[in-house]
Amino acid sequence: QQQVKQSPQSLIVQKGGISIINCAYENTAFDYFPWYQQFPGKGPALLIAIRPDVSEKKEGRFTISFNKSAKQFSLHIMDSQPGDSATYFCAASEDSWGKLQFGAGTQVVVTP
Amino acid sequence: DTGVSQDPRHKITKRGQNVTFRCDPISEHNRLYWYRQTLGQGPEFLTYFQNEAQLEKSRLLSDRFSAERPKGSFSTLEIQRTEQGDSAMYLCASSLGLAGIQETQYFGPGTRLLVL
C-alpha cells in the first residue's frame, strides 16, 4: 500500500519549460517531505526538502509548494534543461530518524 | 570520494543461492538504512540501524533476509535461498542522526541483483 501517491508517471517538456510533479499523502503524521533525483544506474540524490510549517521553498530552479490542508505537495522545475532529464521521487517521513516512504517516481525528459 | 559505497554493484545468482551485499556509509554517520527498489518503483524501506543496533525491520524483510552492522560501521545484507522475486536494486543510505532532527539521507549507487 503506497502511502505517497505521485503523478504523472512521466512527462516530456521542452528546454526552458516548466516541469510540474505532484504528490499526495494521507498520513497526517508525516512532517518531512523531500524530493530526490535519480539518474540511471545511480542512487537517489536529495534535491530539495520541506517541512509542513512553510508553504513554499525555493532553491535555484527548483521549488516545492506545500498544501497542508489538501495533503499535497509539488515540485516545480523552472527553465528545464536537458541535464534535468531523470526520474524524480517525492517522499515523506514521520519520525525524526527518517524512514522514508517514496512515491512511484516521475520520469522527466527534457527535449532540446 | 567520501560518499556511501556499496559492493558489489551487480550480482547474478541462481535461485536458491545465498548472496551478501556490503554497504560502507559516510564516515561518522550513525544511521544506516537499507531500501529495495524494483523497476519503475520508488525505493521501499527494509531496515534501519542506529550505530550497531537494528531498530526497525519492514514486513518486506522476510526471514530469509538478515542485516548486520557490527561495530556501527559498515553493514551487510544477506539473502538466503534467493528467489526470482528478490531481483531488485538494493540501496543503502546513511545519515548523521541528531536526536529529534531530520537529517538528509545520502544514498549509495546500489547493488543490482538478478536471480535466475
Image (spheres, rainbow, N blue to C red):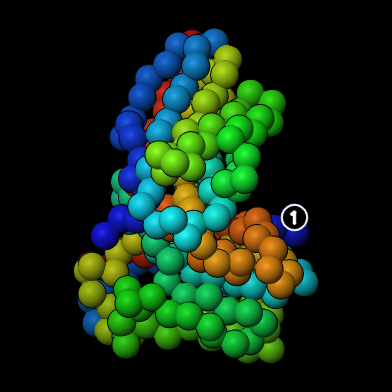
Given the current orientation, which residue lies at the most extreme front position? A69
Quick check: B84 left or right of B80?
A: left
Q: Is residue A52 above or below residue B71?
A: above
Q: Position of residue A41 (x, y in %)?
A: 47, 47
Q: How many marks?
A: 1
Relative depth, front residue between A40 and A9: A9
Q: Left or right? Give the position of B36 relative to A80.
A: left
Q: Residue at (40%, 34%) from the top-left corner? A: A22
Tell which of A75 and B35 is nearer to you: A75
Residue B13: % across, % down: 31, 72
Estimate the x, y position of residue B91 in percent, counting from the top left. Answer: 49, 62
User: Visible in this render: residue B89?
Assistant: no
Location of the N terminus of chain B (image quadrant): bottom right
Q: Residues within 10 Å of mark 1 (few under 14, many from 20)?
A: few
Residue displayed at 69% across by 26% down: A60
Residue A74 drawn above or below residue B106:
above
Mark 1 = which residue? B1
Judge whether B116 appears above or below B38 on screen: below
Q: In terms of image quadrants, where is residue B94? A: bottom right
User: Looking at this view, is B114 or A104 the one in front?
Assistant: A104
Q: Residue at position x 69%, y 63% from top? A: B101
Residue B71 position by quadrant: bottom right
Q: Residue at x 32, y 73 (%)?
A: B60
Viewer can see residue A75: yes
Element type where label 1 sits in the image: loop
Chain of the residue where label 1 is placed in the rendered structure: B
Can you give x and y, in whole percent of width and height, for residue A103 in the image?
A: 38, 48
Q: Say left or right for B92 vs A21.
A: right
Displayed quadrant of residue B109? bottom right
Q: Amino acid at mark 1?
A: Asp
Give the position of the C terminus of chain B as an image quadrant. bottom left
